[in-house]
Image: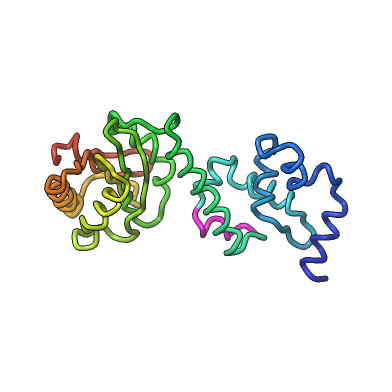
Amino acid sequence: MAQKECNKMHMKNVPYYDRPRERLLREGAAYLSDTELIAIMLRTGREQETVFQLAQRLLATFGDIGELAQASHAELTRIKGVGTVKAVELQAAFELGRRVALSSPEKRTTIRLPRDVAKLMLPEMRHLTQEHFVCLFLNTKNHVIGKQTIFVGSLDASIVHPREVFKEAIRRSSASVICLHNHPSGDPTPSREDIAVTRTLQEAGELIGISLLDHIIIGDGSFVSLKEQGYL
């Protein structure tokens, strides 16, 4: 039996008032559970499993909505019934949510200390299996107004070019920048390359008037601030 026909048959067995899309239209998105919202994003289930059941299993696998939101594409596609397209759509939806949170003035994170950065970014970056170089863009009040992954791969001064970092900072009218990258090994000890990149970015920022406030290295549950280490 074709997948589409199977899903139609499954939905026929679900009472109209229990269907997530209909509930959203009738009551509003705020009244839906995490499972119902995930089911709407997934759109279709699989043979012998409704989309609602697939959403339940997905959440149960990761434990909660927060952990699911941090899952990588590879982790998502390991779940039976979640292919490349579904995984991409879930990741896009969660990223939009993060960006909305950052753009809301009353909910913007204020950075005062390196631990504020770590609190914000550790959950997202501590389990990444490749190095990600990420920039946080701040306004004059040290509110985070944006975030951008600049590149993915081994850190090297020739790859992390100041042009890419400060192009985004200028586009967002940022007053300052905080850079982060993770060490997949879990050890956040700075390398010579880390220090060299930091100094290059600091010099570039001074020339154009956008301060590099810190460069933070994320490990597995720990972090190192190069500012606190005296490199900035």
At 83% from the left and 56% from the top, the residue drawn is 10
Q: Position of residue 28 (x, y in %)?
A: 70, 38
Looking at the rendered image, the quarter that the N terminus falls into is bottom right
* Residue closest to the eye, 177 or 47: 177
Residue 141 part of the magenta segment: no
Which residue shows up at 68% across the image and 38% down it? 33
Up-down: is 109 above or below 208? Answer: above
The colour scheme used to paint the residues is rainbow
Asked if the magenta segment contains residue 75, the reply would be yes
Q: Is residue 200 or residue 230 the one in the foreground?
A: 200
Q: Can you say whether 116 is above or below 202 in the image?
A: above
Q: Examine the rendering and report whether any part of residue 75 can be seen.
A: yes
Residue 172 placement (x, y as % from top left):
32, 47
For the record, the magenta segment spans 72-80
Residue 187 visible in the displayed image: no
Residue sitting at x 26%, y 57%: 164
Front residue of 184 and 95 = 95
Q: Position of residue 9 (x, y in %)?
A: 86, 59
Q: Quadrant of residue 142?
A: top left
